[in-house]
Structures are given as structure tokens and as C-alpha cells.
Amino acid sequence: MEHAPKAVTRFELKQPKTLPLALFPTAWQSLSMLEEGVWAEIKVGGEHLRLFSEHNAQGVQVSVYNVNTKHWIAPSEPVDDIHQGKEKAEAYAREFLKPLGLTLPSLEWKKSRST
């Protein structure tokens, strides 16, 4: 009695084009470990960014998130204090907007966990 060869199923693992947010424990993902921090939102020329400067379990960090593309422009980067984080977040946002011919509007920084 002959056995027909079994069909072999091939699984291909594809590399994602971008890294999933879960790899970056930043801003909104570390709220339970948040000690203090501030955030600001920018909506200009069709762009929508969120800037964060927060002190969490990993220390004081700055990050900038592009809401439209759902990607981090600047994933968590250590800074000395909240004030320096605000300055760096603004610089990252300014550099992101510059090639688009947009300028950084004045920001209203809010305490983290506020809306």
C-alpha cells in the first residue's frame, strides 16, 4: 500500500515595514509607571503630532508620535529633565514640519493623563 506524499505547507515570515509600537515602551504605554510628565498636541497643515516629556520607570524621556501615520517620529530618548524633554520634543517636531513648509505653532503643554 503506497502512501501519497503529504503536501508541505510553507509559512513565510514577513518582516513588518515598521516596528510595532509595543516594542517602544513610551508615553501612552507606560502610564501605569508614570511619575510625572507633560504632553502637547500639534495640528497644522493636515499634520497631527503628539509630543511627550515624561518621567517614568525608565527615567525622564522625550518622544514624538505622528497620529496620522501611527508611527513614532522620535521613540523614547533619555533626557536630563522634563524641561529639556519639552525643548527636544519641540525641536523634533520643528524639524519634521520644516520640509513640509510648516512652522511649529505655539504649544499648550498639559500634565500627562489629562485630555
Image (cartoon, helix red, strand yellow):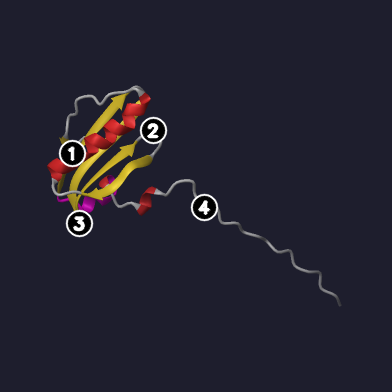
Q: Which of marks 1 and 2 is nearer the N terminus?
A: 2
Foreground mark, 4 or 2, reads 4
Separation of marks 1 and 3 at Cα, in angstroms:
18 Å
Q: Where is residue 91 in the image (x, y as percent from the top left)?
A: 24, 35
Residue at the image point whose x is 26% and y is 46% from the top: 27
Q: What residue type is labelled 3?
A: Ala
Q: What residue type is labelled 4?
A: Gln
**Prevailing SS of the magenta stretch:** helix
Q: Residues within 10 Å of mark 2 (few under 14, many from 20)?
A: few
The disc at residue 15 is 4
Of the pair 95 and 43, the residue shown nearer to us: 95
Q: What element carries label 4?
A: loop
Q: Which amino acid does label 1 sit on?
A: Lys
The disc at residue 86 is 1
Separation of marks 1 and 2 at Cα, in angstroms:
21 Å
Residue at the image point whose x is 41% and y is 49% from the top: 20
As for residue 53 lying within the magenta part, the answer is no
Q: Earlier in the sequence, mark 3 or mark 4?
A: 4
Q: Which of marks 3 and 2 is nearer the N terminus?
A: 3
Q: Is mark 2 on a helix, strand or loop?
A: loop
Q: Position of residue 110 (x, y in %)?
A: 16, 35
Q: Which of marks 4 and 2 is nearer the N terminus?
A: 4
Q: In which quarter of the image is residue 65?
A: top left
- Residue 24 in sight here: yes
Q: Is mark 3 on a helix, strand or loop?
A: loop
Foreground mark, 3 or 4, reads 4
Give the magenta part as a residue range. 28-35
Separation of marks 3 and 4 at Cα, in angstroms:
30 Å
What is the tally of numbered marks visible in this picture? 4
- The residue singled out by tag 2 in the image is 68
